[in-house]
Amino acid sequence: MKILHYMFGIPPVRVGGLVRYATDLMKRQYQMGHEVSLLIPGNISKNGRRKTVISPCRNNYMQIPSYDICNPLPIPMCNGITDIQSFTQCCDGREFAVFLQKLKPQIIHIHTFMGLHREFLDEAEKAGIPMIFTTHDYFGICPTAVMLFRGHICEDTEWENCGFCCQNAFSQRRLKIEQSEWYRIFRKHPGAVRVTKQTMRKVGSLTCKSIKLLQTVFGIQRSKERLPGKTSWNGKDYAVLKKYYASMFARISYFHFNSATARTIFEKRLGQLRGEVVPVSHSQIDDHRKKRVYGKKLRIGYLGSWAEHKGFFDLIKVCDALVKDGCTKLELHIYSDTDQRTEPYVVNHACFDADQLGDVFCDMDLLTLPGIWPETFGLVALEALSYGVPVVFSAYAGAIDLLHAYPDIGFAYDGSMRGLKEILQKIYENRELLLMANDNILKMDDEFSYDRHVSQILYLYERFIR
């Protein structure tokens, strides 16, 4: 089978759940003998917009033939969009037509619209190539990709308030730098956060403003709890952006929804869609379940960034309140690439590699998913369960599908701080709940076969190719 994947970049420049899922899927498909190719966005020309062209990458990724789009659309990540024109700019679709004619993929698997021109979808549709879209996040129906407005799930279906959420969007200059060759070089450099003007000038001439911006990009960014600001912006016409992405979604042949949560939100915005729910996984998830023993201290785990939508600050406030109420035998184990917390009950951990997952879950009694955004899935929940660790699910987490399929393998709450405090206090006062949850995890059917997941996706492809 000839499969073309599109995503917004590869490690170490781009990381996260989307990247992990897509790269693992490509690698396994390649190992199974399929003809797999990868298309990613590359540089945006420094002196204005130029012709969009596709060229082979200097090095293939994991032996997979890889191609680079020169002058793609910008990649905003989760920071929002203010310059709407630059994100809806047209290009000559003939370059995509020639590329697809040469490659002749039987299926295109799109993991995001970030950086991708609509003309690519137009040419694929003309060529009769089916396109599968995985709903890793909400980009395309939300310019910040997280579907939140002032701490609550966004109900603005007309995009009238998007300017408020996009006030912290990166400038076009910064977006260009983050898609530049310089950025790729420095991301691969182990001392990237310590780069100087001298080391930057060794790789080419940069303006003083660009050097300053690169130093800002590579400086250690501290996540702070943001408070709602003034709802003032320059009256950007987000209706144009909404219409642009809606037209892209209309060209998708089939939707691979990560969860029932993702399907509900996408269909609320786009109407009924042709697709199905297939929970995601990755290659490092395997069956490591074991009987666990619980001590006097309740060791709560949190993996992720210090972000509001991840519920991190709510979790800190809840733990503060629990300790104040006398739950002193409590530890919060934080695994994050951000600064260290100073709360006495916090145990700070550095980032970890995939082969260290066993050690990570050995250090916790339960994992928390305290997010306040409607996360499309949450691979960390499946990782925890694969080691026999019970999970506390926010009602907003797409991974709560696992709890619906296998009741009593964890704990659910309504997504509020009050609900989180109540469930954690209940577990703190009765560790038997953890023992019962662990027993139920051990009784689960084998949900940890990555090859089975890959087979599900391949079967989905085959239906459309036939």
Image (spheres, rainbow, N blue to C red):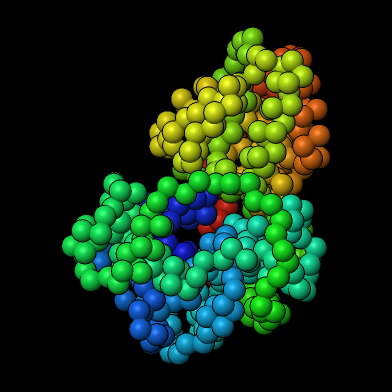
Q: Is residue 284 visible in this depiction of the protein? A: no
Q: Nearer the viewer, residue 77 or 217?
A: 217
State the image coordinates of residue 317 (x, y, percent, origin top left).
Answer: 70, 33
Q: Hey, which quadrant is residue 241 in on the image? A: bottom right
Picture residue at 65% right of the left edge, 51% below the top: 226
Picture residue at 74% right of the left edge, 26% below the top: 321
Location of residue 328 with respect to 78 vertically, above or below: above
Q: Hey, which quadrant is residue 395 in on the image? A: top right
Q: Residue furthest top?
A: 296
State the image coordinates of residue 397 (x, y, percent, origin top left).
Answer: 70, 45
**34 lies left or right of 297:** left
Location of residue 421 with respect to 139 vertically, above or below: above
State the image coordinates of residue 305 (x, y, percent, origin top left).
Answer: 55, 43
Picture residue at 47% right of the left edge, 30% below the top: 349
Q: Nearer the viewer, residue 51 or 264?
A: 51
Picture residue at 41% right of the left edge, 57% below the top: 217
Q: Nearer the viewer, residue 41 or 188?
A: 188
Q: Tell how many labels.
A: 0
State the image coordinates of residue 93 (x, y, percent, origin top left).
Answer: 47, 87
Q: Residue furthest left?
A: 202
Q: Is residue 290 visible in this depiction of the protein? A: yes
Indicate the quadrant containing the C terminus: top left, top right, bottom left or bottom right: bottom right
